[in-house]
Image (cartoon, rainbow, N blue to C red):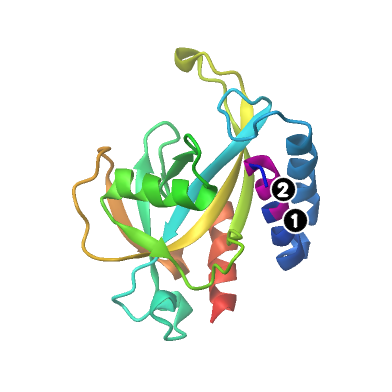
């Protein structure tokens, strides 16, 4: 199966698990069906990105399986272009799958080597799909476009190493997350337990 076919199957599986999001996911599926390479940054009007929702397992939250959803903490990094705290993530590179991309991006941006949370079964379906607009960036010669961000729940496998990218980081209680895309993830994580 090609990467594109695997992506489309993943989005269809996601749509079955989260039927309330079918309308937006259907738009992405339709756009990617007609696309040569939905993972390419040059794929316009939009392409696939991936990010990691890193949960703190030491406080007895969801990741530790204790059933205390709001006790969990989420790792956020400062995203200077938008002046916001966001989950680490970025573009899918080379032949990576989206989950591999999320793991790599988290390692590069935070220094944490992580594994996928047990919620992710085979096939790997993200916990969330967020489709959002990216403003034009003249310095990168990029027009306005959209990202279809596949988000995966990750668990650190040890202490943080040295990140490759310099980002400020903060652990925030899951209960305090109120950004629209992240609050949707918060609600899904609460239902995981």
Compared with 72, 22 (above or below) is: above
Q: Callout 2: helix, strand or loop?
A: helix
Q: Nearer the viewer, residue 35 or 54?
A: 35
Question: Which disc, if any, is residue 8?
Answer: 2
Q: Residue at x 31, y 43 (%)?
A: 108
Using the rendered image of the protein, determine whether residue 178 is visible from the camera's viewpoint.
no
153 relative position to 39: left or right: left
Based on the displayed image, in which of its 4 quarters is residue 10 positioned? bottom right
Density class for disc 1 (Cα within 10 Å; few <14, some 14-19, many ≥20) is: some
Density class for disc 2 (Cα within 10 Å; few <14, some 14-19, many ≥20) is: some
> Magenta span has 23?
no
Using the rendered image of the protein, determine whether residue 113 is visible from the camera's viewpoint.
yes
Based on the displayed image, in which of its 4 quarters is residue 126 positioned? bottom right
Q: Position of residue 31 (x, y in %)?
A: 76, 35
Compared with 140, 156 (above or below) is: below
Q: Position of residue 61 (x, y in %)?
A: 39, 78
**Do the residues under discs 2 and 1 have CB atoms within 8 angstroms?**
yes
Q: Main structural element of the magenta stretch: helix, strand or loop?
A: helix
What are the residue bounds of the magenta stretch? 3-9
Question: Which disc, if any, is residue 126?
Answer: none
Compared with 125, 64 (above or below) is: below
Residue found at the far front of this picture:
1
Question: Which disc, if any, is residue 12?
Answer: 1
């Amino acid at each position: 199966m090609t990467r594109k076919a695997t992506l489309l199957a993943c989005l269809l599986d996601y749509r079955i698990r989260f039927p309330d999001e079918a309308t937006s996911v259907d738009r992405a599926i339709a756009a990617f069906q007609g696309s040569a390479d939905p993972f390419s940054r040059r794929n316009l009007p939009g392409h696939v990105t991936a990010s990691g929702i890193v949960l703190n397992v030491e406080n007895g939250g969801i990741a530790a399986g204790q059933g205390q959803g709001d006790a969990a903490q989420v790792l956020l990094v400062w995203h200077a272009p938008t002046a916001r705290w966001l989950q680490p993530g970025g573009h899918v590179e080379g032949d990576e799958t989206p989950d591999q991309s999320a793991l790599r991006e988290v390692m590069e941006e935070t220094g944490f080597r992580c594994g996928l949370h047990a919620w992710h079964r085979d096939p790997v379906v993200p916990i969330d799909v967020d489709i959002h607009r990216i403003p034009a960036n003249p310095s990168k010669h990029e027009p306005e476009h959209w990202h279809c961000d596949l988000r995966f729940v990750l668990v650190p496998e040890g202490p943080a190493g040295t990140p490759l990218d310099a980002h400020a980081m903060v652990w925030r209680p899951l209960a305090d997350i109120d950004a629209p895309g992240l609050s949707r993830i918060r609600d899904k994580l609460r239902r995981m337990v």
